[in-house]
Amino acid sequence: MSRRPDTEPVIELRGVEKHYTMGEFTVKALQKVNLKIYPGDYISILGPSGGGKSTMLNILGCLDQPTIGEYFLSGTDVSHLSDDDLSKVRGKELGFIFQSYNLIQQLTVVENIEVPLYYQGVSEKESREIAIELATKVGLGKRLDHRPTELSGGQQQRVAIARALSCDPAVILADEATGNLDSKSGGDILQIFDELNAEGKTLIMITHDEAMADRTPRVIRLKDGEVAFDTYDEPN
């Protein structure tokens, strides 16, 4: 499977490596990673424990920077930005969905969805309109005033999805997003992911679950910090 050479990637990693120093030793968590991710891609990134998945997530999510190499996000080199600039990039370009939901327990459904919009300076009126629309989109239109403790795990993850969508990010990163859910709730969440991708959203799922990977057109496998397999046969 390949992409048209004239399609501009939304993410491009060029020779990316991530090294950690542990005493006298250097651990290479990522090695010589060259990767292009295109608008509308729906990807599973898999690998064994210690294979580099978490490090890859941190790099792609601008939570960490490569030791060597370049990372272009929406055409901008973000490899060596300051922490403040990386934070701005995360807020505008990336949406995160975590296994543990990471909701603020004191806030309602609609207020949790509004949090990223607050940091982007969106007006209170517009934020509320966006949050209600997104809550309704993920099936929580009748639970706007509920707090996380009043919701099931699947419902909390729906809130997290709506929050990730609030700033209309270029890429959505999901880290073991169904890991805390039963099979029914997990299936419902994956169905939402399928629908979002059908609408044109770029989704990257970090997972160890082969069944999840079976849903995505593109699969990337990491081993010992390297890309061991990629469904796409990249053009030269």
Image (cartoon, rainbow, N blue to C red):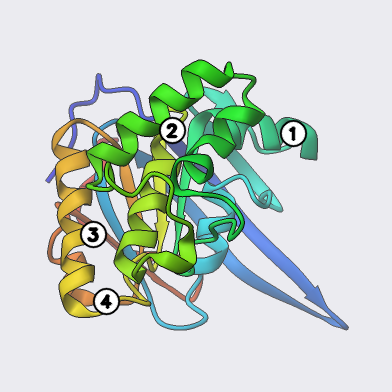
**What is the distance, in whole Å, between disc 2 and disc 1 at their CAs?**
24 Å
- Of circles 3 and 4, the one toward us is 3
Badges 3 and 4: C-beta atoms under 8 Å apart?
no
Which residue lies under the disc numbered 1? 81
- For badge 2, the amino acid type reads Ser
**What is the distance, in whole Å, between disc 1 and disc 4 at their CAs?**
33 Å
- Of circles 2 and 4, the one toward us is 2
Which residue lies under the disc numbered 4? 209
- Identify the element where label 1 is drawn: loop
Residue at x-position 40% and y-position 25%? 130
Badges 1 and 4: C-beta atoms under 8 Å apart?
no
Which residue lies under the disc numbered 3? 189
- Identify the element where label 3 is drawn: helix
Which of the two discs, 2 and 3, labels the residue nearer the N terminus? 2
Viewer-side residue, 181 vs 234: 181
Task: Decide if residue 82 is in sight here.
Answer: no
Residue 205 percent across, percent down from the top left: 34, 58
Residue at x-position 87% and y-position 83%? 24
**What is the distance, in whole Å, between disc 1 and disc 3 at their CAs?**
33 Å
Which of the two discs, 2 and 4, labels the residue nearer the N terminus? 2
- Identify the element where label 2 is drawn: loop
Residue 89 percent across, percent down from the top left: 61, 31
**What is the distance, in whole Å, between disc 3 and disc 4 at their CAs?**
14 Å
Which of the two discs, 1 and 3, labels the residue nearer the N terminus? 1
> Horizontal placement of 125 versus 144: left or right?
right
**What is the distance, in whole Å, between disc 2 and disc 3 at their CAs?**
17 Å
Residue at x-position 69% and y-position 37%? 87
- Of circles 1 and 3, the one toward us is 3
Dot 4: within a 10 Å radius of its alpha carbon, few (fewer than 14), some, or many (20 or more) residues?
A: some
- Identify the element where label 4 is drawn: loop
Which residue lies under the disc numbered 2? 166
- For badge 1, the amino acid type reads Leu
